[in-house]
């Protein structure tokens, strides 16, 4: 093929590309509609009256908006309490991950010591292990330690995740060694270097890690379900799931359930939309090993 | 540059201690428990559990409920993973082709289900699929049809759950593929176009081969996630109707924490773990070196 032929050949392709553009938008919009439909349905339903919830033909948009579902739900379920439980656990998990994962990430990225490769191997291995494998002995261990129904019992198994170590190590590798060497020459200890030089340089990574850890803890279900018996200690997802699967409580009231789901999902969605850039970056970083 | 043995180990210590107590020890303990008759009384007196050899494992493979849960989990994975990957790839390619202005808007929309609490999402979907008052039932009635009882039907319950899983996870796959697509140099695409490659040829000849590492990673993490499926059947169907949505994880949870057959449940956990490891290794082998 000669160069001269090229423009003639690309022209049709170029045109078909432009013709395709509206089609791409149509397809994506259709996809987006399907993706958002359950959320819209949830939000709209939570403001409907009981009669409109079960009206036939269906009422899509409430004609009289009501807060009755939320009122009834808050009567039956102490949401502020469960919300606080979730916040406390998520904050503790996040802070401990930020500190511990960064510490090990720093050691793996920037310190030379015997056993470093073995520890990194352990971290990679830990990434692969499904959480369900540990549940049974963890429950026995926590019962023995009298940590069932305690914040410690909810936090400790997640206090230092392998994902965080991996993420922090990746970011810290890009810090120039000369910078750390210069500090060492000036007599700075590793602890000082870590807190005063390394941590300020990896703020974007810390932001990403905070978001992922906080969210992971916020959405976590299986372990809090097992590690709490006292309803007052339930986190939000456990409270909602228990409420939704207990016919005596929700009594088949879809309005109340949608109001509950709405209140659980809303903070997460708002947080996500506000911080969406960090999410995609974090996933892409973790994916590009 | 010196060697910092003391500092290295001190910085590693918090993670290592937590890892040992809350991960390494439980992994081993699950294995040990799977060879015992560990029950409710042993929660307070773990050392009194009796060693029973491979009895739990032999019992498992004659246990119809377990075999059914294994089948259901396989069903969920075999149908769900390819659907999730394919749709994630389609959305990523669409977003990477000709969309520039609304790209963030679409990306946020497709990714939103990933971040939302799965329990809440399952509660919402249960109502979406409700045969009398649900969203789908409403759409059906608008066109004069009657919606089936999705979650109450043995044949439809699992496909419904798969639909929800695809809906929830397509965003993760999409983000991975977008990153992978953007890593393909534009020169490669332009060269193909100059050679007269059409849209489909470009997709087959360039996009798919160069996305292989991303495809591998996305497939492995989606498969692992789907093999552990728990919340969806827990909230939406409690494993029913007639165990048609009972997954291995849900079965294990029930045996372990409702009936306190903890030795037996441990054996289940290990079978699932071995399956997950086996499939992961297999996928790494199958997908990795085909281009070489």
Image (cartoon, helix red, strand yellow):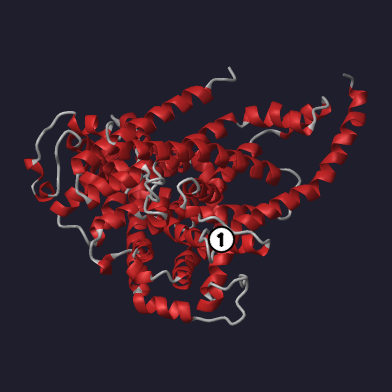
Looking at the figure, which quarter contains the C terminus of chain B?
top right
Task: Pinpoint residue B60: horizontal percent, then vertical percent.
Answer: 26, 34
Q: Is residue B2 visible?
A: no
Task: Determine whether, in the image, residue B204 is placed left or right of residue A129.
Answer: right
Q: Is residue A145 left or right of residue B257?
A: left
Residue drawn at 57 percent across, 81 percent down: A65
**In the picture shown, does residue A56 fall above or below A35?**
below
Q: Quadrant of residue B182?
A: top right
x%, y% of residue B45?
A: 8, 47
Q: Residue at x 44, y 42 (%)?
A: B226
Which subunit holds the residue at mark 1? A
Between B126 and A271, the residue placed more toward the observer is B126
Q: Indicate left or right for B170 with B144 as reference.
A: left
Q: Secondary structure at mark 1?
A: helix
- Looking at the image, residue B15 lies above or below residue A89: above
Locate the N terminus of chain B and report the quarter of the image it occupies: top left
Residue tagged 1: A38
Q: Quadrant of residue B207?
A: top right
């Amino acid at each position: 093929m000669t160069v001269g032929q090229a423009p003639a050949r690309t022209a049709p392709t170029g045109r078909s590309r432009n013709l395709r553009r509206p089609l791409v938008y149509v397809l994506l919009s259709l996809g987006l509609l399907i993706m958002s439909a359950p959320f819209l349905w949830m939000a709209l339903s939570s403001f409907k009256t009981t009669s409109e919830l079960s009206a036939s033909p269906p009422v899509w948009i409430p004609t009289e908006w009501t807060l009755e579902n939320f009122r009834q739900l808050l009567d039956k379920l102490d949401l502020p309490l469960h919300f606080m439980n979730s916040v406390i656990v998520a904050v503790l998990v996040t802070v401990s991950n930020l500190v511990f994962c960064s510490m090990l990430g720093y050691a793996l990225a920037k310190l030379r010591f015997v056993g470093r490769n073995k520890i990194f191997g352990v971290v990679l291995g830990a990434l692969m292990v499904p959480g369900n494998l540990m549940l049974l002995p963890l429950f026995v261990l926590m019962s023995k330690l009298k940590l069932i129904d305690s914040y410690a019992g909810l936090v400790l198994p997640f206090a230092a995740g392998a994902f965080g170590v991996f993420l922090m190590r990746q970011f810290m590798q890009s810090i120039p060694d000369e910078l750390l060497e210069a500090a060492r020459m000036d007599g700075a200890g590793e602890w000082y270097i870590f807190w005063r030089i390394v941590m300020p340089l990896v703020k974007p990574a810390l932001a990403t890690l905070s978001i992922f850890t906080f969210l992971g803890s916020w959405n976590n279900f299986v372990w809090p379900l097992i590690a709490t018996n006292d309803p007052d200690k339930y986190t939000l997802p456990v409270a909602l799931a228990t409420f939704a699967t207990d016919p005596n409580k929700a009594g088949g009231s879809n309005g109340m359930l949608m109001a509950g789901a709405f209140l659980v999902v809303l903070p997460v969605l708002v947080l996500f939309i506000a911080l969406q850039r960090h999410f995609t970056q974090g996933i892409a970083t973790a994916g590009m090993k | 540059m010196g060697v910092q043995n003391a500092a290295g180990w001190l910085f590693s210590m918090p993670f290592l201690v937590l890892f040992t107590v809350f991960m390494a020890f439980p992994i081993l303990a699950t294995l040990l428990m799977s060879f015992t008759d560990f029950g409710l009384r042993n929660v307070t007196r773990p050392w009194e559990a009796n060693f029973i050899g491979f009895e739990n494992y032999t019992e498992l493979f004659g246990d119809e409920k377990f075999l059914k849960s294994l089948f259901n989990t396989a069903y969920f994975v075999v149908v769900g993973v390819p659907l999730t990957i394919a749709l994630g790839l389609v959305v990523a390619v669409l977003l990477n082709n000709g969309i520039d202005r609304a790209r963030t808007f679409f990306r946020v929309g497709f990714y939103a289900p990933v971040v939302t609490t799965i329990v809440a999402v399952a509660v919402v979907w249960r109502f979406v699929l409700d045969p009398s008052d649900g969203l789908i039932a409403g759409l059906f009635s608008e066109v004069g049809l009657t919606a089936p009882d999705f979650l109450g039907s043995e044949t439809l319950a699992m496909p419904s759950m798969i639909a929800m899983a695809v809906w929830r996870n397509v965003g993760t796959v999409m983000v991975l593929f977008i990153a992978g697509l953007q890593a393909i140099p534009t020169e490669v695409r332009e060269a193909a176009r100059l050679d007269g490659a059409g849209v489909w040829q470009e997709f087959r000849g360039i996009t798919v081969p160069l996305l292989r590492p991303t495809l591998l990673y996305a497939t492995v993490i989606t498969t692992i996630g789907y093999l552990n499926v728990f919340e969806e059947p827990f909230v939406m169907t409690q494993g029913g109707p007639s165990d048609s949505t009972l997954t291995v994880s849900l079965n294990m949870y029930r045996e372990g924490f409702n009936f306190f057959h903890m030795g037996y449940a441990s054996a289940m956990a290990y079978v699932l773990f071995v399956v997950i490891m086996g499939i992961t290794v297999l996928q790494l082998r199958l997908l990795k070196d085909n281009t070489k």
